[in-house]
């Protein structure tokens, strides 16, 4: 069941992001700006920037927007941006891990705490949920970008690069690696000239909790509201995403 929930969570996050295209762009711009600020604006010598630009292109961000974000980072305009995390619980003991990028820490803390409180949860202390999630590398590719019709062959090719799991969702292939093999897998795609639409380190729950539909919907209200916050980059949780819940959220 946990395996099903993992991919259902990923599918839910992807669908939610697709519905919030402007939010996806905001996140991508921040990632590019920080990467350019920290290690320069050359994608050939800055792996973090190369990945950020790759993700932006996968989200169909215009080239001029990408270039402006790089110039912003190199020019120092992104100096105040910092990445922070929050850990807490939604109703019924569902763990919620929030990642944010902000230029105003006080504003973001107040906003995240307010959302937890308003929707029946509570903000905890950092480190309190670390044992509930594993960091995994998640790569999303269009099926057509891989030069093979045999997924078993692809799996065999990628095992040496740290492949843990491969699954298909619609017309996409999703590949999972450990945190330690994240860079190695990216190198494999570069070597094979396979186009990756999106790559990121996600926090995957080691175990999930199933709730009655009404309770689960209440938790998802908190999750959705958190994802709408301009400073929030990603939200992870250990709620079991059942088929019934997926249907009620109009995501199939």
Image (tube, rainbow, N blue to C red):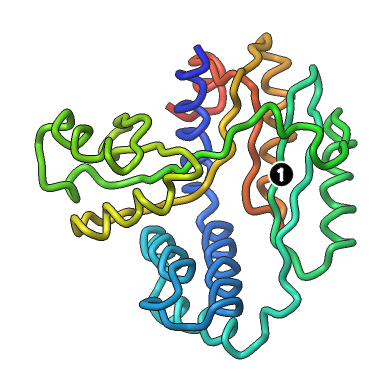
- Residue placed at 58% from the left, 61% from the top? 27
Task: Spot the residue most to the bottom.
Answer: 75
Quadrant position of residue 196: bottom left
Q: Is residue 245 visible?
A: yes
Q: Foreground: 217 or 232?
A: 232
Task: Name the residue tied to disc 1.
Answer: 98
Q: Secondary structure at mark 1?
A: strand
In the displayed structure, does residue 135 sit left or right of residue 83? left
Quadrant position of residue 104: bottom right
Give the x, y percent position of residue 149: 9, 36
Q: Quadrant of the C terminus?
A: top left
Give the x, y percent position of residue 233: 63, 53
Indicate whether 138 appears above or below 31.
above
Within-10-Å neighbours for mark 1: few <14, some 14–19, many 20+: many
Q: Foreground: 78 or 35?
A: 35
In the displayed structure, does residue 81 sit left or right of residue 111? left
- Residue placed at 40% from the left, 76% from the top? 43
């Amino acid at each position: 069941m946990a395996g099903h929930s993992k991919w259902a969570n990923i599918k839910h996050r992807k669908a939610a992001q697709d519905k919030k295209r402007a939010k996806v762009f905001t996140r991508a711009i921040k990632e590019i700006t920080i990467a350019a600020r920290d290690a320069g604006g050359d994608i050939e010598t800055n792996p973090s920037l190369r990945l950020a630009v790759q993700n932006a292109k996968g989200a169909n961000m215009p080239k001029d927007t990408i270039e402006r974000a790089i110039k912003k980072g190199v020019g120092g305009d992104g100096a105040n941006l910092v990445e922070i995390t929050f850990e807490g619980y939604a109703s019924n003991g569902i763990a919620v891990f929030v990642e944010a990028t902000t230029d105003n820490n006080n504003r973001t803390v107040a906003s995240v705490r307010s959302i937890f409180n308003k929707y029946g949860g509570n903000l905890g202390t950092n480190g309190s949920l670390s044992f509930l999630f594993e960091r995994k590398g998640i790569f999303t590719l269009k099926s057509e970008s891989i030069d093979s019709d045999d997924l078993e062959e692809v799996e065999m090719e990628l095992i040496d690069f740290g492949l843990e799991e491969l699954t298909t969702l619609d017309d996409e292939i999703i590949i999972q690696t450990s945190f330690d093999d994240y860079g190695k897998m990216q190198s494999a795609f570069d070597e094979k000239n396979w186009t990756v639409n999106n790559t990121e380190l996600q926090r995957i729950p080691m175990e999930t909790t199933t709730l009655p539909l009404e309770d689960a919907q209440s938790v998802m209200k908190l999750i959705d509201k958190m994802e709408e916050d301009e400073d929030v980059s990603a939200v992870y949780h250990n709620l079991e995403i059942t088929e019934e819940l997926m249907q009620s959220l109009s995501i199939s």
